[in-house]
Amino acid sequence: MYWNGGGSGLIQTTPIYDTQSASILTFTTTSVSAGTKYSFAVAAYNLVSTSSPSNLVQVIAATVPAQPAPVTRTASALTAITFSWDAPNTGGSPITSYIVQSNLG
């Protein structure tokens, strides 16, 4: 596994990870910063030599989601008020819940 370390330059020629097994076909890195663009490539290795790198995959590490908008009151009665909003941009990671806040009167 090769990468550019989050910089804008070319992929580094020193591997950042060697699976040590031909049966491992995944890689996870935790050395990323939110919102930073990374480039990755993979090469295969055998006793003869190392292959050319794979196609370049560019990804942006997830960041905080955008704020929900517009928030609107959709119904109200003497004992209840209903609000709705549009789902915001996820920032690259699925939204798992929303937090509704109130000043309670």
Image (tube, rainbow, N blue to C red):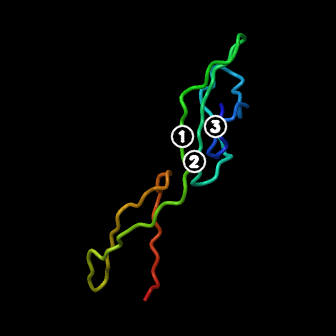
Q: Nearer the viewer, residue 73 or 67?
A: 67
- Badge 2 marks a residue whose secondary structure is strand
**How far is the residue under mark 3 from the one under mark 2?**
13 Å
Q: Are marks 2 and 1 in contact (CB under 8 Å)?
A: yes
Element under label 3?
A: loop
Residue that badge 3 annotates: 10
Tell which circle, 1 or 3, labels the residue nearer the N-terminal end. Answer: 3
- What is the crowding at mark 1: few (fewer than 14 residues within 10 Å), some, or many (at least 20)? some
Q: Is residue 59 left or right of residue 48?
A: left
Q: Position of residue 9 (x, y in %)?
A: 64, 41
Camera-nearest residue between 95 and 33? 33
To which residue does mark 1 refer?
A: 58
- Which residue is rendered at x = 45% and y = 67% of the image? 67
Above-or-below relation of 31 to 55: below
Q: Nearer the viewer, mark 1 or mark 3?
A: 3
- The foreground one among 31 and 102 is 31
Q: Mark 2 is on which residue type?
A: Lys
Q: Residues within 10 Å of mark 3 (few under 14, many from 20)?
A: few
Which amino acid type is shown beneath numbered disc 1?
Gln
Residue ID at (66%, 33%): 2
The residue identified by callout 2 is 37
Q: Residue 17 at what x, y percent from top left?
A: 70, 32
Three-letter residue code for mark 3 = Leu
Q: Residue at x 32, y 74 (%)?
A: 72
* Vertical position of residue 91 compared to residue 53: above or below: below
Q: Along the polypeptide, which appears first: circle 3 or circle 2?
A: 3
Residue, far front = 9
Q: Residue furthest top?
A: 48
Q: Residue at x 57, y 26 (%)?
A: 54
